[in-house]
Amino acid sequence: ATGMFTFDPGFVSTASCESKITFIDGDKGLLYYRGYPIEQLAENSDYLEVCYLLIYGELPTAEQKEQFVHTVMHHTMVHEQLNWFFRGFRRDAHPMAMMVGVVGALSAFYQDSLEISDPEHRKIAIYRLISKIPTIAAMCYRYSNGLPFNYPRNDLSYTANFMHMMFATPCEEYKPNPVLVRALDRIFTLHADHEQNASTSTVRLAGSSGANPFACIAAGIASLWGPSHGGANEAVLNMLDEIGDVSKVPEFMEDVKAKKRRLMGFGHRVYKNMDPRAAIMKQTCDEVLKELGLENDPQFKLAMELEKIALNDPYFIEKKLYPNVDFYSGIVLSALGIPVSMFTVIFALARTVGWISHWNEMIGDPGQKIGRPRQLYTGADRRDFVPVEKR
Ligand code: SDX
């Protein structure tokens, strides 16, 4: 029990670790970053301020924020030799495959000065990752599309700079739409952290051995790639494309109930109520589509119809299946001009601060030990070796 939050003994015994960063109440649909409700942060804060909060545990003063933003924005370039890594990939390589490889390679560029027992050295790794992950993400997109890389611009905000690196061309000036920048910045905030999800637990376990933090983040990216986790937003769009039309929904729902398909973007290991991020994502999706004059976007309409049917269907109600953060994120990312293959890269970009905050919290704990999950052995009893001629 800590302050206002109390846990039943049964829950405490299954917890894999203690953390002060993020609190989730799956039954009530609550999500707090360092005690602040996600709804208030999404509405009133911005992603870099949320990064500061997740790392340091408090919202920054105006001076602290200015210093943090300046430091992050002045480390956004990557080592020029990193460009050569991309030339080794096939043009049709999945952007997540490139991101795993290049982020892992950062451990070959920035390992010299890293004594992770020193908080100041950990801070260097944290800032380098938050600064450079948008640059690498944009490079994955540019390379996949045969486009020249864009260098970062320090005169733009963190998210506007990301959109510049993604979409600017040398041929004309690129001016990010402030409504779309604000929407994408809020999407980053919604994805920033989520307690001990599969990818964050991967980073913690990898980091518990004292491994290089850049390599640990690459392990988190690999875990997030799966369709049951961060790959779900890509799977939602593919599912909507396959259903095609509202008239096909009843047939699809029958397949789901027959367990032939899963309603991607629905269900959650922890939330057995609405994922609070899904409602904010839906509102953000609505704002972006209105700004772009796409209110009648067929995929959005199909998604809303699918949600309405599922929320009133006894099968889904009984299994406590509600929309999660991924259900609407694909539609809004698509509207922002981000291709499906880049959806999980966007998720990884935003989640990097959560991963590295958990890594920092763990490494900074003097009682920290290497992770060593145990198992229930269900294999063969003891037996003696049999030579091949007798098998
Ligand atoms: C993320 O952990 C996190 O915090 C993750 C995340 C984060 O921010 O890091 O929130 C991000 O990963 C969100 C989840 C994105 N994934 C999807 O949308 C993929 C579709 N969802 C499912 O695969 C599933 O809901 C999971 C994996 C998300 C959760 O799985 P659970 O809670 O372990 O549920 P389960 O697989 O044990 O299913 C429980 C029941 C089963 O039926 P029964 O065996 O009891 O009869 O619900 C059914 C499942 O068949 N079910 C679904 C379903 N999800 C669960 N049936 C249809 N469609 C679905 N989406």
Image: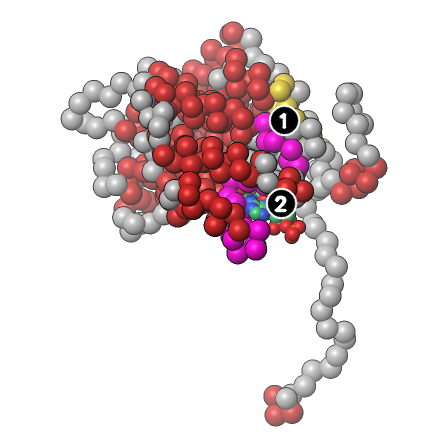
Q: Are marks 1 and 2 in contact (CB under 8 Å)?
A: no
Foreground disc of the pair 1, 2: 2
Which numbered disc covers residue 315?
2
Residue 101 in sight in this render: no
- Which residue is painted at 41% across and 32% down in the image? 300
Q: Is residue 189 left or right of residue 2?
A: left
- Which residue is painted at 17% across and 23% down in the image? 172
State whether residue 373 is above or below residue 111: below
Q: Quadrant of residue 211?
A: top right
- Which residue is painted at 68% across and 86% down in the image? 386
Q: Magenta region, mostly helix, strand or loop?
A: loop
Instruction: Return the x and y of residue 25 as percentages of the image width and height.
Output: 69, 30
Q: Earlier in the sequence, mark 1 or mark 2?
A: 1
Residue type (three-letter) at the residue carrying disc 2? Tyr
Which numbered disc covers residue 31?
1
- Which residue is painted at 67% across and 33% down in the image? 26
Is disc 1 surrounded by few (<14), some (14 to 19) or many (20+) residues within 10 Å?
A: many
Is disc 2 surrounded by few (<14), some (14 to 19) or many (20+) residues within 10 Å?
A: some
Q: Is residue 131 left or right of residue 26?
A: left
Q: Secondary structure at mark 2?
A: helix
The residue nearer to you, when weighing 343 against 34, is: 343
Q: Secondary structure at mark 1?
A: strand
Quarter of the figure with the C terminus: bottom right
Is residue 17 highlighted in magenta? Answer: no
Count the marks: how many? 2
Q: Quadrant of residue 2?
A: top right
Instruction: Return the x and y of residue 299 as percentages of the image width and height.
Output: 39, 36
Residue 178 in sight in this render: yes
Residue type (three-letter) at the residue carrying disc 1? Leu
Q: Which residues are magenta?
A: 255-276
**Ligand 1 under 8 Å from disc 2 Cβ:** no
